[in-house]
Image (spheres, coloured by chain):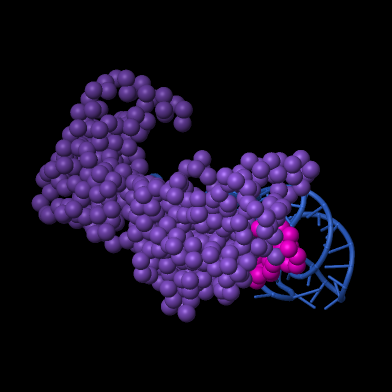
Chain colours: A purple, B blue
Amino acid sequence: MTVTRFAPSPTGYLHIGGLRTALFSWLAAKNKGGMFHLRIEDTDLSRNSDEALAAIIEAFEWVGLDYDGEAVYQSKRFDLYGEYIDRLLAEGKAYRCYMSKEELDALREEQMARKERPRYDGRYRDFDGTPPEGVEPVIRIKAPQSGMIEFDDGVKGKISIAATEVDDFIIARSDGTPTYNFVVAIDDALMGLTDVIRGDDHLYNTPKQIVVYEALGFTLPRFYHVAMINNEEGKKLSKRDGATDVMDYKKQGFLPEALLNFLVRLGWSHGDQEIFSLEEMVKLFDPNNLNKSASSYNLDKLLWLNAHYIKNTPHAKLAELLHDFGVDIHGHDKLEILLDATTQRAKTIAELAAQVRLIIERPAAFNEKSAKKAFKGDAVQMLEGFAAMLQGWEKELHLPCDYHAVLEKFVADNEIGFGKIGQPLRVSLLGDMTGSGLDEIMAIIGLGETLERIAKAVEYIGTLGSESEVAVEQIIEVK
RNA sequence: GGCCCCAUCGUCUAGCGGUUAGGAUCCCAGGUUUUCAUCCUGGUUACCGGAGUUCGAGUCUCCGUGGGGUCACCA
């Protein structure tokens, strides 16, 4: 059975790069009907925070990734790691090193001065004399001193590193707590991991972990080192690049399915397909098809995907999401028409909220340019005439097509083009020249509100006086 | 600097020795639309460089160049 995991350290929020590797691991497990575990890497007691942990779990919930069983906390397994340390010590595969931090630093500086690679020199590897006073030893593992450490990476292919590149690294600090590469190897093995999918910044940890696997006689999982996500300039993605926190995407009005779809296509593809539901991803995903090269974050594509998913989200769900953006349209009698109209011009839920607000709230002001253009000439007569026709209309005014009939009759009766009434009416209703169809807008806000907005516009035009005439003439001249 | 990894349109990618190098996004043009947007149609843009292997190389090999990662008692 395929078993994978995501193993974040609770030192901050969940990064989108982290979410992508989590997604890959989750998909790899689900594709095979396997298990996906969450493990919290909190062995460095001084750097953990509960808020960070909560943030990670919140992000997981938001995007809908679940994990099997309980989350594993490494901080609660120190006894277990201790047993393995004792075992290695007893078997002579690890040893106490009495070198102080200061001595180590000095050694490192010397090596750097000689342009050598800084590494531990193994001075206590075979030490059996009397240990120096007053030094709490660290525990180091005996790494092979010659030959190659090799493994077949599921993404990168064969990786081989000279054993001399790996020194006798520390597996337990002087305070007795175990270190990262040691506990990762133990937990990955004990949790039955078959496939380890992680960022390729871990590529160099793998040989160290292999040393632990071999010392303890564990069987190796298959490793997949996924290339990083860069920013739009091709540099490493950092906080400077804006939204790297997964939850920021929620705040900005992105849908989790859009974010997941975006992330899965960074480094993975299935022919020419661009849109993947979670079910399709599960069905099609194979970590062995992962791309070797790094990819760049591209906001345009995310936005495009988000717009797509907004158009395909049920209206009831959209109404719910709009709530977080200060728009409450629950129970609105024209909810369907309203969302059909606005959904076409929104790339995020935040934009959708703005579009909805534009319609359901009376315009606070008229856009100056639009007003000048639309309210010139006989706009007042047009608006008043149209208002009169609406008031005298004998059939029902309920659906967009009802209003459309009025508009058509008005245009026909007056022998004018659509724009003649359309433009001033649009600015009257929305305050600007862009936006949804007039029929829809009127149907959504209803007859009373339509008449009120027209009246307000007429009133506004009245206040412009001769000034606007001049402005209009100027516009005509420019043309 | 040592070691490791990577390299197709601006971006995400398809390609797995023989293709007019395909799709998506972006951008531009046209159509639909009273407007904007959506939608539809069309268009511009790519195999990092150099050797080699081969009848034939984006695809294989080597070198170069560029980019990235990593070198902790962090994870």
Q: Residue at x 51, y 71 (%)?
A: A189
Q: Nearer the viewer, residue A109 or A222?
A: A109
Q: Where A86 sits versus A230, above or below? A: below
Image coordinates for residue B12, horizontal then vertical, percent? 57, 58
Q: Residue at x 54, y 52 (%)?
A: A173
**Relative to A335, A278 lies left or right:** right
Q: Residue at x 27, y 48 (%)?
A: A324
Q: Residue furthest bottom?
A: A1
Image coordinates for residue A438, horizontal then vertical, percent? 27, 47
Q: Quadrant of residue A213?
A: bottom right
Image coordinates for residue B51, horizontal then vertical, percent? 89, 62
**Relative to A286, A276 lies left or right:** left
Q: Residue at x 43, y 78 (%)?
A: A33
Q: Nearer the viewer, residue A141 or A470?
A: A141
**Residue A44 visible here:** yes
Q: Residue furthest front?
A: A130
Q: Nearer the viewer, residue A311 or B70?
A: B70
Q: How many tags in the picture?
A: 0
**Residue A378 visible here:** no
Image coordinates for residue A343, horizontal then vertical, percent? 33, 54
Q: Quadrant of residue A453?
A: top left
Instruction: State the extent of the magenta-drawn residues as a range.
Output: A145-168
**Relative to A34, A195 lies left or right:** right
Q: Where A419 sits versus A146, above or below? A: above
Please tell me whether residue A52 belongs to the stretch shown in magenta. Answer: no
